[in-house]
Image (cartoon, coloured by chain):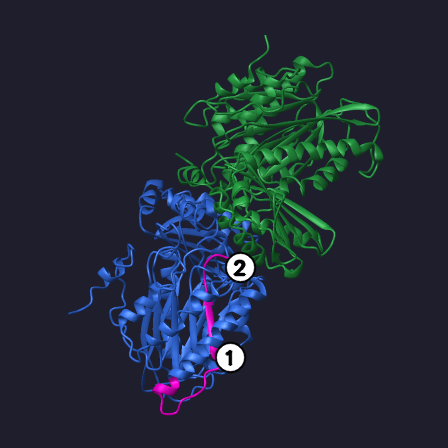
Chain colours: A blue, B green
Amino acid sequence: MPIDLNNFINSYGLKSKMQDFQDLDHIDGVSISTICANLYSKPRDDLVMFYFRDGANYASVYTQSKIISENIKWNLSIKSKKIKSLIVNTRNANAFTGSEGYEALKDIAGELSIQLSKKQNEDEDYPKKILNNEILFGCTGTIGEKYPREKIKKNIPELIKKIKYTQNKLIWLKAALGIMTTDLKPKLAMEECKIGNEKIKIYGIAKGSGMIFPNMATTLGYIFTDADLSNNVLKKLLKKNIDTTFNAITCDGDTSTNDMVSIFSTGKVKNSIIKNINDKKIKSFDQALHSVLLNLSKRIVADGEGANKFITIKVIKSKNDKDAKKIAFSIANSNLVKTAIAGEDPNWGRVIMAIGKSGININLDKLSINFGNIKIIEKGKIFKDYNESEVANYMKDKAIDITINLNAGVKNFTAYTMDLTKNYIEINADYRS
Amino acid sequence: MPIDLNNFINSYGLKSKMQDFQDLDHIDGVSISTICANLYSKPRDDLVMFYFRDGANYASVYTQSKIISENIKWNLSIKSKKIKSLIVNTRNANAFTGSEGYEALKDIAGELSIQLSKKQNEDEDYPKKILNNEILFGCTGTIGEKYPREKIKKNIPELIKKIKYTQNKLIWLKAALGIMTTDLKPKLAMEECKIGNEKIKIYGIAKGSGMIFPNMATTLGYIFTDADLSNNVLKKLLKKNIDTTFNAITCDGDTSTNDMVSIFSTGKVKNSIIKNINDKKIKSFDQALHSVLLNLSKRIVADGEGANKFITIKVIKSKNDKDAKKIAFSIANSNLVKTAIAGEDPNWGRVIMAIGKSGININLDKLSINFGNIKIIEKGKIFKDYNESEVANYMKDKAIDITINLNAGVKNFTAYTMDLTKNYIEINADYRS
């Protein structure tokens, strides 16, 4: 009997709709287990462990905030070339918890490495000792609260007991659910591609849904592949693709202390060796990775706190990337633009305001603006057939596209955001209760 | 019988409370008239004229937006050393209206200068012809809508007929009411000071209440004094004082195309000549001007769209002004900080987040944070006697003070903002209806 995923998600108390992850199955070399460590007042899975029995190559990008959480500090200190485990908790960010927060991670990593080494000894023909230095942490939740070291530590044996060497869509879904905070929907994405003749899988999970603004990685995102790629190639591919995906979204203009996107490759598929990312053989993987990252990014925006509409801001024909990005985010982060869209008001004057406040010099006589396919401004003037009621009608759509044509060059940047609703206020005014 | 100002304001359909302008009377050389030009669907005064019968020296600061309204362009083109009239309309920003919007101002200025010249001829012993070049415009309202040239033009005769040469508090109040858009309360402030032995008055009016973020002057503010000061001295005094007042406030992080703060001095008090602003004789005026500007700025924040709480962010002991300002505004513009305060949640972790995302390098071990007088962080650690319920209790106050001590230098910056409430969304989702 097929699993009814909708019912499964509903059983988590979530008002979630199905998403396209019916085909998720196993990525060789990845194990997942999840558990309720009672980090929330209501029981739910809040601790997720990824275990790479033969290790995984990896690359990460982290928050650019000047104040970073203790787990990001930990991850930055990792020198090992291979990772054996990633452990993610919600409810507590382990940020501004000082040396106590850091020591807690050391303690947990110590326990985890002992227990995992024991499991290797039992299960493997050629067991390897797992080191603290091969463990990464993801933390998300409230900043400044004491890190629940004991609650996490005491659940490690049970987490390990739950490890299975073959994964199915259910466990991927549980992992995506387990890393959620205020998210309403789990976020998963998958692609299949090729490196040379070898078929490769790329699966990803992510979480939002507040403090979302791209000053690097923004939020948590974890990508898994069975490809065999070096840390160096993974790092370059991740950096290349993050700018137009996770770094192109904003929900509220706020950047977390804990942002982290990582990619893990288990190397179980013996594809040809890739030395640099311009190699033609990596093109299909590169595109598939971009697609997974973009898919997850869009899901984060669509499920942004209180979001009712999905907004795409395209700035095209810019002199350079920097200007395009600055204008796109000036619009995407404007509360006035976002409330107008929430109110389905075709108040394009606020878009003009946001372009102006971006600080970028533009030639107004060349500026054109479209809402969807409807021309609003053409070469600096209100379009001759402009008809407000037509635009008002367009504003009722769930997905609003705004295109700013600067007619000044060949560079483009697209930002993704959501409307600003009363619901956002409600969620954030009593986040911790 | 004294005028009941509360009733008067209520008669405007406003839920306003009295403010401290009972003592406003006449500033010699200033005339004010207001009228309903039917710019709104409901009748209210929406056109305000200030007339300086003998001219006024003046200085202005304007928006730093890269897209400026037609009236700001007009004002920037004015070469005259003295101003004869300032005319302010609401409901329409005259922004992104192109040459048609500019021509409308020329047309209105032409009509106004003819009519005012006629009045000078009738009323003055030594009449002077008034020129287009002696007229300033203030516009505020929706961007991109056709400027109501005819409605404004045809009301000029009536505006001029209403001119009286002696002002009282009622007409100041009408002026402050007449320039309002979404403001709930009129904003007035007054100070008296001395230049040498001469008593000087400084009166000011201003309006908010959305698109408030300091990239220069922010919103409309008009200051009037009977002092005799040169344009050069006025300009320096205005620039000096604007940074810590109008440029220290933010409601929603959005900057208007129309921001404008001007000061007019009629020179009716024959004070000693001031050549530079370091002259000791100007100190009392300087302080009084700062007080009027700060008073108006705070009123704008307190009446910010949907505001329920007044928030003061003090960044102290910074290495330099720039860092202090950047951190203060990173906090003051954070939706997450502002919704937490709306929800009376002592979630100081979001303040940490906002400091981090400011991009300023700080020494965390030196960072101290107070909410009001309550210590939260001391030298990088949660204060030993920290008691969340005490802070939760403080959050119920109407005025929330947050002090960030960087312990890194001697520079300070204070920003003023308000909480972000559902009411903000409500106001802005259907602003134009």
Q: Secondary structure at mark 1?
A: helix
Span highlighted in magenta in the image:
A120-143
Say which residue appears at 42% left-offset and 62% top-offset: A90
Quadrant of residue A242 within the rendered picture: bottom left
Q: Amino acid at mark 2?
A: Asp
Pointer 2 or 1: first along the chain: 1
In the picture shown, does residue A397 fall above or below A7? above
Q: CA distance from mark 2 to mark 1?
A: 41 Å
Quadrant of residue B48 within the rendered picture: top right
Between residues B343 and B70, which one lies in front from this camera angle? B343
What residue is pinned by disc 1?
A: A133
Mark 1 belongs to which subunit?
A
x and y percentages locating residue B243 in the rendered image: 67, 43
Q: Which mark is residue A227?
A: none
Say which residue appears at 34% left-offset and 77% top-offset: A31
Q: Is residue A121 within the magenta segment?
A: yes
Q: Which mark is residue A323?
A: 2
Whether pointer 2 and pointer 1 mark residues with C-beta atoms closer than 8 Å, the reply is no
Q: Is residue B98 left or right of residue B320?
A: left
x and y percentages locating residue B10 in the rendered image: 49, 20
Q: Is residue B397 something one can see in this rendering?
A: yes
Few, some or many residues within 10 Å of mark 1 (<14, 14–19, 20+): many
Between residues B70 and A64, which one lies in front from this camera angle? A64
In the picture shown, does residue A414 fall above or below B92? below
Q: Amino acid at mark 1?
A: Asn
Mark 2 belongs to which subunit?
A
The N terminus of chain A - image quarter: bottom left
Say which residue appears at 63% left-offset and 15% top-offset: B164
x and y percentages locating residue B1 in the rendered image: 59, 7
